[in-house]
Amino acid sequence: MSRLFPALLLLCASMAAETHTVYPVKHSPVFTAQAKPLARVRSGDTIVTRTWDSGGKDEKGVWHIQHPYTYPEHGNPLTGPFYVEGAEYGDTLEVHVDKLRLNRADGYSSFRVSQGVFNPGADLHDPNYGMDAVRTGTSTLLPWEIDAAAGTVTPKLRPQDSSGWKIELPARPMLGCIGVAPAYNEVRTSGPSGNYGGNMDYNDIVEGATVYLPVFSPGAHLFIGDSHARQGDGEGWGNGVETSTDVQMTVKLHKGKRLGNPRLVTPTHLVSVGSQPEFGSSMDFALRSSMTDMLNWLTNDCGLTGPEAHVLLGGVVEHKIITYYGSVATMIPKQYLPPRCHVFPVQGAAR
């Protein structure tokens, strides 16, 4: 009977989990605890929803945000918030991206990588692709074709832009925005990122990834948005191949487990995300933040000794530039870690 009881508890918990299907017609431009929840969910529940693209275009090609933007509409339109029952300050919210699927045949990006990542005097082409090519009144956007069935994205370069080489890239849908309400009841726009998540624009937040976010307010208030069909490291355009997506995610609450930074567990890596305190700041802050958090993860959570952690941080650590504006991922391959460390929170990590 003693062995059967825990199994019955797990069975009851799985039976109690619900699926919430929510397709909102309005979106939030900010991360806040003050917005009315789209749904109230519990730990273990699954959410099925959609995102608009960063300009407010939905899966049917309808623009919902006027252009030029007027306050407070400027920023990525966010789907949310989802209120997680029982979540409170000091907890961790786990969000597993079960499915992330492209749902329309077009997208767009900037026509040129940001001038700020090149040396002065670098040979840069005219940033103007063509007025109204993507959106009325805008000239700097490059249209893309999306073939969800084939899993490809193709830029619609003009004849004068092409050498004759066809560029066709594999689609890799990602969530640019995922986060919770910030600390101290602050309201943050959907442009920057921070310890609450936000507009991280991290191209490894794809189907199958698990994101961990610190909770700062009752209910957590989870938001998502800003899907990209593809994006390179650094987000050089200042955007990705912007498009809408169908999303399924499962949330889980870890009580009393406090995080300093957003974290990810992917099929191959443990990842800590360090974000800049403001746009255009040095990457030093984000690098130190993510390295410190990874050290804490390996020692305090995983149960490795300090010397063991430093061996890994010096010997196998990997870094990704998430955005050129100051966000960095610190990554440790799972293959060099004991199996207990492959999940979060770690179980049985006694020192």
Image (tube, rainbow, N blue to C red):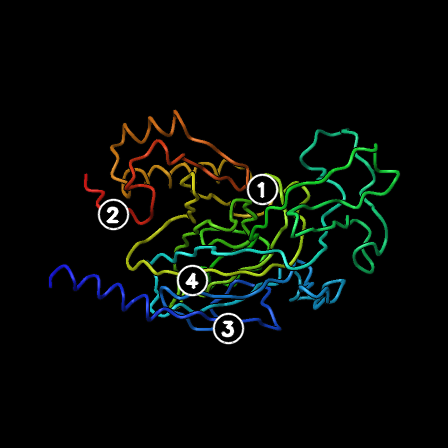
Farthest residue toward the left? 1
* Element carrying mark 1: strand
CA–CA distance between discs 1 and 3? 30 Å
Image quadrant occupied by the N terminus? bottom left
Relative placement, left or right, of 336 versus 73 is: left
Q: Is residue 107 above or below residue 5?
A: above
Q: Say if mark 4 contacts mark 3, CB within 8 Å.
A: no
Relative placement, left or right, of 121 versus 347 is: right
Image quadrant occupied by the C terminus? top left
CA–CA distance between discs 4 and 3? 22 Å
CA–CA distance between discs 1 and 2? 33 Å
Q: Where is mark 2, residue-wise? A: 347
The image quadrant of residue 213 is bottom left
Which label sits on residue 323? 1
Q: Residues within 10 Å of mark 3 (few under 14, many from 20)?
A: many
- 233 or 281, which is in the foreground? 233
Q: Where is mark 4, residue-wise? A: 184
Q: Is residue 293 above or below residue 212?
A: above
The image quadrant of residue 6 is bottom left
Closer to the eye: label 1 or 3: 3
The image quadrant of residue 254 is bottom left
Nearest to N terminus: mark 2 or mark 3: 3
Q: Amino acid at mark 2?
A: Gln
Q: Say if mark 2 contacts mark 3, CB within 8 Å.
A: no
Q: Amino acid at mark 3?
A: Leu
Closer to the eye: label 4 or 1: 1
Q: Where is mark 3, residue-wise? A: 38
